[in-house]
Image (cartoon, helix red, strand yellow):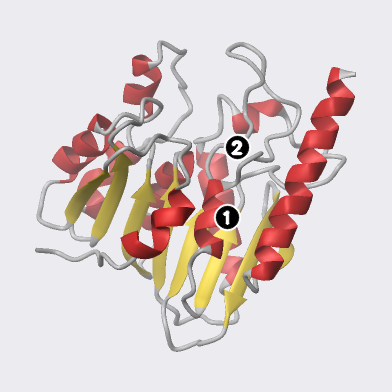
């Protein structure tokens, strides 16, 4: 019964996400990378303007502290909700590996890819490959990366691999994986890449990291640690009062987007 209930919940999550994307004019496709098939929603209507690329959080990764879920599709896809709240001409949304795929999930969608290995080099490579595929028809388009929660880590790691990224924004971004794991007293992730390790390489990239003052999942100190590691004058932190990790960030996102990343 529990398995059937979980399947129903994920099915409802997929339907709600598809409806949200459709209302926002985002068209879906699945892109096959060297390791994963990834779900993408996008709207491109002005090829001469930059594209905002949104990367989803970790999704429904765990049923309990010790039991991973059977399907990482997020019940509340905050990354997609942010993308849907963005009215700019060009928007691309990237789900993380195995989110919104199936059912059934492909054979290579083992739980390790949304638990211990969710920040592994293989995952970062696949996400970067999907982004390149999605934008292949527009090779000269500049990219503004945006990531929610664990998607913030992926966004920063992708930014360090590319030369077409013009800015980086994160929302409750897990920018220091080891620090966050230690704060929650959970096991280390030996194969995890961490955004803080590439922070110095991003020192000259305009960026804003939005944190919630009441976020206990990814504490605001996480962004401050990243800022210190990056140095320079391009990394800004904006703390949003009263916001928790799971708050309705999409409701305040249009106003937060008015703040432009720059190098002061």
* In the image, residue 197 above or below residue 94: above
Q: Nearer the viewer, residue 81 or 177?
A: 81
x and y, in percent, of residue 211 in the image: 30, 41
Q: Residue at x 14, y 39 (%)?
A: 228
Q: Residue at x 57, y 55 (%)?
A: 80
x and y, in percent, of residue 108 in the image: 76, 37
Give how far apart the Cα atoms at labels 1 and 2 are: 11 Å
Q: Which residue is mark 2?
A: 59
* In the image, residue 202 above or below residue 228: below
Label at residue 80: 1
The quadrant of the image that shows the N terminus is: top right
The quadrant of the image that shows the C terminus is: bottom left
Check disc 1 and report its element: helix, strand or loop.
helix
Q: Quadrant of residue 4?
A: top right
Drawn side of residue 240 relative to residue 254, left or right:
left
Q: Quadrant of residue 193?
A: top left
Q: Earlier in the sequence, mark 1 or mark 2?
A: 2
Estimate how packed mark 1 is, as few (under 14), some (14 to 19) or many (20 or more) residues with alpha carbons within 10 Å. Answer: many
Contact (CB < 8 A) between labels 1 and 2? no
Residue 222 in view of the camera: yes
Residue 158 in view of the camera: no
């Amino acid at each position: 019964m529990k398995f059937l209930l979980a399947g129903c919940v994920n099915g409802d999550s997929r339907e709600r996400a598809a409806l949200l994307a459709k209302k926002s004019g985002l068209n879906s496709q699945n892109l096959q990378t060297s390791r994963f098939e990834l779900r993408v929603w996008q709207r491109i209507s002005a090829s001469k303007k930059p594209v905002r690329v949104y990367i989803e959080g970790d999704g429904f990764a765990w049923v309990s502290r010790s039991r991973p879920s059977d399907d990482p599709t997020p019940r509340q896809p905050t990354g997609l909700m942010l993308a849907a709240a963005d009215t700019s001409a060009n928007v691309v949304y990237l789900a993380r590996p195995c989110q919104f795929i199936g059912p059934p999930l492909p054979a290579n969608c083992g739980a390790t890819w949304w638990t211990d290995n969710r920040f592994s080099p293989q995952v970062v490579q696949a996400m970067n490959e999907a982004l390149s595929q999605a934008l292949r028809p527009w090779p000269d388009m500049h990219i503004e990366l945006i990531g929610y929660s664990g998607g913030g880590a992926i966004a920063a790691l992708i930014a360090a691999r590319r030369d077409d990224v013009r800015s980086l924004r994160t929302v409750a971004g897990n920018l220091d994986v080891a620090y966050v794991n230690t704060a929650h007293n959970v096991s280390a992730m030996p194969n995890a890449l961490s955004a803080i390790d590439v922070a110095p390489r991003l020192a000259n990239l305009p960026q804003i990291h939005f944190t919630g003052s009441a976020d206990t999942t990814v504490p605001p100190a996480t962004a401050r640690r990243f800022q210190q590691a990056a140095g320079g004058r391009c990394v800004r932190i904006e703390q949003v009062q009263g916001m928790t990790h799971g708050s309705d960030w999409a409701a305040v996102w249009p106003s937060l987007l008015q703040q432009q990343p720059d190098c002061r």
